[in-house]
Image (tube, coloured by chain):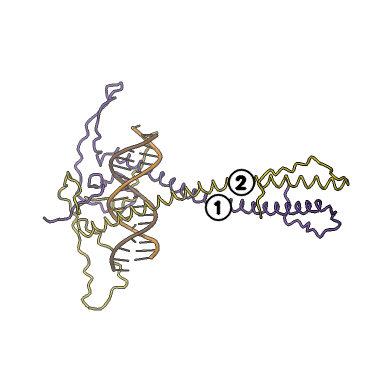
Chain colours: A yellow, B purple, C brown, D orange
DNA sequence: CCTAATTGCGCAATGG
DNA sequence: TCCATTGCGCAATTAG
């Protein structure tokens, strides 16, 4: 089955991106220097303000689509591009940090588990000794020279 | 010199993005339908394939910069856009998963630390008992009814 | 109001 | 060839 893919035309804001007017700083060279092509910038509603004071609180002024060739436009774009780059870098960095955090925590976990294992072992040894003692006492038998294993199977921590 | 501005043009592949020809099937409605402005579509090298078998192994065929209005071009773009979206979704998902992993590991860690604390306490209790016992034995004194604190300060787990 | 930061999206180059 | 990833720019939104 061939794919009858529909041209969804997702969401290109207006369906067109125009030329990239060279703003400033000719980095290298060899640009086709595409000619012509200019979007006539419509003028903005001269909402003015000669009345000195202040005004226009609820103005629904949309933005004049931005004049692509305006110097100021390019400036803003450039700034934004920079900001975007920065933001993305941070984002990635954060992701990596998080990943590393996972690794650290995993290590820590293993460490802790090992410790638990150790402590558990120590405990079981001591308990066994206790039980034995208890039995001896119960049987009223003094252990004369029991082959008790007084071995310290682990460095006994304080607390 | 009208534009003293230098085109920094960070890395826009060629410094220009052109029109977005609407391929077919106007999805919704209300497209400004920008007039004019069209990149003259050059015809593609009719690289065909009628010779039945297979061929062109080491051919250095350059890519015809892609004809913007080609049906096939749009198709590829669309597919790629889809793939991109998918990829990004996964990426985000993964990031979230990782973050959650961190949380889980943190919890686990606390759990383990608590357990360690408990075990340590138990151990210290048993050890104290032992020491006392040893002293009694050494002093050759049978503890008749010592005020020993046999309190089980913690539920002694099995093992 | 303005600027910086985020976010969704498309394009093209590149990797597998 | 196709899909997946990635860097990048644009524009709309969201914070500050």
For image coordinates 70% across by 51% down, the residue present is: B123
Which numbered disc covers residue B106? 1
Query: Image quarter for residue B76?
Result: top left
The residue at the point 27 percent across, 62 percent down is A63
Quarter of the figure with residue B56: top left
The answer to which of B68 and A113 lies nearer the viewer is A113
Disc 1: host chain: B
Work out whether A116 lies above or below D14: above
Q: Is residue A64 left or right of residue B155?
A: left
Q: Residue furthest right?
A: A140
Q: Secondary structure at mark 2?
A: helix
Q: Position of residue A47 (x, y in %)?
A: 23, 70
* Residue found at the far left of this picture: B1
The residue that mark 2 highlights is: A113
Which residue occupies 73% across, 57% down? B153
Q: CA distance from mark 2 to mark 1?
A: 14 Å
Image position, residue B121 (x, y; %): 68, 54
Label number found at residue B94: none
Q: Position of residue A126 (x, y in %)?
A: 74, 47
**Mark 1 secondary-structure assignment:** helix
């Amino acid at each position: 089955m061939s794919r009858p893919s529909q041209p969804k035309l997702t969401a290109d804001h207006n369906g067109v991106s125009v030329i990239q007017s060279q703003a400033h700083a000719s980095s290298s060279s060899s640009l086709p220097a595409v000619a012509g092509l200019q979007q006539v910038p419509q003028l903005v509603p001269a909402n003015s303000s000669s009345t000195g004071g202040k005004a226009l609180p609820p103005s629904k002024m949309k933005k004049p689509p931005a004049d692509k060739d305006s110097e100021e436009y390019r400036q803003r774009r450039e700034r934004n591009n920079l900001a975007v780059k920065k933001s993305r870098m941070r984002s990635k960095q954060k992701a990596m940090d998080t990943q590393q955090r996972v690794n650290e925590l995993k290590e820590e976990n293993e460490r802790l588990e090992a410790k638990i294992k150790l402590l558990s072992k120590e405990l079981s040894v001591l308990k066994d000794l206790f039980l034995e003692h208890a039995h001896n006492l119960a049987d009223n038998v003094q252990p004369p020279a029991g082959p008790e294993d007084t071995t310290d199977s682990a460095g006994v921590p304080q607390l």
